[in-house]
Amino acid sequence: MSEDEVHNEDKPAPFMPMNAIQLVQVIILGVVVGLCVWGLTFFLETYVLKAVLCQGNQTAKCALGPQYAEATATILAAGVGLYVLVKLQIFRPLLVVLGTVISLWGILGMIATLPWYGRGLACVLLYACAYMLFVWIARIRMFWLVVAVMLGVVITVRLILTA
């Protein structure tokens, strides 16, 4: 065995290992988080915030109800997502959740013209894809490279969504 072979064996792989079962679990988690964001937004807007904000002639506050509902639902669902990612032993779960939340912040407001089932399907698919993408990116061992790639993806997604 030559000296080069010994040194090559000591070097860690550039990516953290991840099996197919973990990837499927992450995709399912993204679906569940997307459903939670969509469902909680509808529930909070319809049954909580309308009762609180839309009393009398407070139309300005009432108009902000959907945004408040989505922000609250997104934060709550992100907490659930972070908890499950930690339980699944996914590498850098906080970066995954932060990348997803920042990328998809306000997505329900952007797709508000779709019918209710279209909004739900879009939310589920976008969250599943975002979780899968950011988990895949977070596997890179070099932290600065992970942050740079995630930042580039987040900026690209935000530019696409706001175009």
Image (spheres, rainbow, N blue to C red):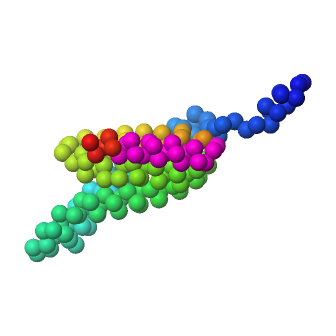
Q: Which residues are magenta?
A: 141-158
Q: Image quarter for residue 78?
A: bottom left
The residue located at (24%, 59%) in the rendering is 66
The residue at 33%/44% (across/down) is 159
Residue 22 in the image, given as x and y percentages of width and height: 57, 40
Residue 126 horizontal/vertical position (percent): 37, 41
Task: Answer left or right for 36 relative to 5.
Answer: left
| Residue at the (15%, 68%) spot, across then down | 60
Task: State the count of labels.
Answer: 0
Does residue 115 lie above or below 74 as drawn? above
Residue visible at 26% across and 67% down in the picture? 48
Most extreme residue toward the left is 57
Judge whether residue 157 is colored magenta.
yes
Decide whether the magenta segment is chiefly helix, strand or loop.
helix
Q: Is residue 37 left or right of residue 56?
A: right
Quadrant holding the C terminus: top left
Q: Is residue 97 above or below residue 125?
A: below
Whether residue 28 appears in this view of the structure is no
Seen from this angle, which residue lies furthest bottom? 56
Q: Is residue 150 magenta?
A: yes
Q: Is residue 151 left or right of residue 161?
A: right
Residue closest to the eye, 29 or 1: 1
Where in the figure is residue 77, as x and y percent of width and height?
Answer: 42, 56
Q: Up-down: is 39 above or below 127?
A: below
Quarter of the figure that contains the N terminus: top right
Considering every residue shown, the one lying at the far right of the view is 1
Q: Could you say where residue 130 lies in the image, as x and y percent from the top left?
A: 43, 42
Viewer can see residue 160:
yes
